[in-house]
Image: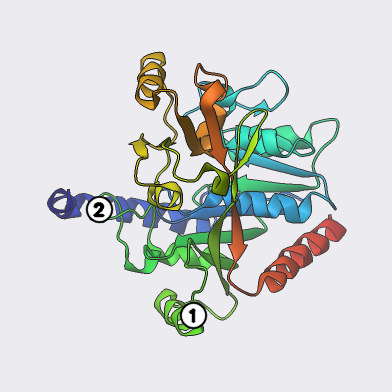
Amino acid sequence: MKLLRTLLFPLAIIYGSITFIRNYLFDVGLLKSYTFSLPIITVGNLSVGGTGKTPQIEYLIRLLSNKYSVATLSRGYKRQSKGFILADASVNAAILGDEPFQFFQKFPAIQVAVDANRKNGIEELLSQKKSPEIILLDDAYQHRKVKAGFYILLTAFGDLYAHDFLLPTGNLRESRTGAQRAAIIVVTKCPKNLSEAEQISIEKQLNLSENQQLYFTFIEYEDSIYSKETKLKLADLGNESKLLLAGIAKPEPFFEYLKKENDLCLTFPDHHHFSESEITAIQKQAKGRKIITTEKDYVRLKDSMLSEQLYYLPIRSSFVNNEKEFDQTILDYVGTSARNR
């Protein structure tokens, strides 16, 4: 695979030239970006997948939804539907996409919408009888047709965009210079005890501009798993044999956190839609054991024949330090923008 990516280097140069020209045309106004009067926060990345956008969006929902009317807008990756959809009781993961459906299930007080055309999606949200006061754009960093008021860029610890290259040789969707659009850069999936020296080293590698803020987060796993009706402490499971299942971009930390000697691990592609034959095969391999999966996979599997033995492990994004400073920066932006609306 590494050799193939090296051989594809000429294609990466062509791809980089195309994205550079596109960004330049937006920057100078030859391609139009649309702005809106309400606070819009974009959360995204430069690389393809696996940086922890979902827990970061959920962090912002928890921070803002007690004070403001919040909506999330995603494209609904791999959903089996088209156009604008505002979540209601009739939707499921196939219609909405797994991540938006997860938001809808966990945060019933907010509006959750999907639309590949973010401009149209925002206009549809604003036309609702109860329009949101804040919109969180999920994975829209490269969606230049909408100019958000605030950009948060995520990059994973150990896989920093500063050391990556453009597709298909590397994993970057655009040049590293695209990071300059971000007001905040968050290094995700850090060790919980990341030292100050390591933080300073990463800051130097990312070469931030003076107006950018840098934060470090880690994934915090709960100490319990959940099914439709049951909550179980992981400690109470002891060394009980389990089947661990993940269809996410980088499942290794999930498996490492849960795996015991007698556990079986099954890996599927990110955002995978499970067929009936695959679900039957999973049930056979489980042999009556508990199946523990990620929250994102759970919303796709919870109504299948696996439901009686299926559990999920919730996660959260937590800050290594300076959490209050991050919160205040977001609240200041939202408060100022809302007053100026």
* Residue placed most toward the observer, 90 or 83: 90
* Residue placed most toward the observer, 301 or 31: 301
Residue at horizontal 65%, vertical 32%? 230
Number of other residues with Cα within 10 Å of mark 2, as a class: few under 14, some 14 to 19, many 20 or more: many
Residue 77 seen: no
Residue 318 seen: yes
- Residue 246, quarter of the rendered image: top left
- Residue 169, quarter of the rendered image: bottom left
- Residue 130 position, x and y percent, is 85, 34
Q: In the rendered image, which residue does mark 1 sit on?
A: 195
- Residue 25 position, x and y percent, is 47, 55
Q: State the SS at label 1.
A: loop
In the image, is 37 to the left or to the right of 253? right
* Residue placed most toward the observer, 320 or 283: 283
Q: State the SS at label 2.
A: helix
- When the figure is inspected, residue 89 is found, relative to residue 22, above or below; the finding is above
Q: Amino acid at mark 2?
A: Ala
Quote the CA–CA distance across marks 2 and 1: 35 Å
Q: Amino acid at mark 1?
A: Ser
- Residue 305 position, x and y percent, is 50, 16
Q: Earlier in the sequence, mark 2 or mark 1?
A: 2
- When the figure is inspected, residue 21 is found, relative to residue 88, above or below; the finding is below
- Residue 71 position, x and y percent, is 73, 42
Residue at horizontal 47%, vertical 83%? 200
Mark 2 or 1, closer to the camera: 1
Residue at horizontal 76%, vertical 39%? 110
* Residue placed most toward the observer, 155 or 102: 102
Q: In the rendered image, which residue does mark 2 sit on?
A: 12
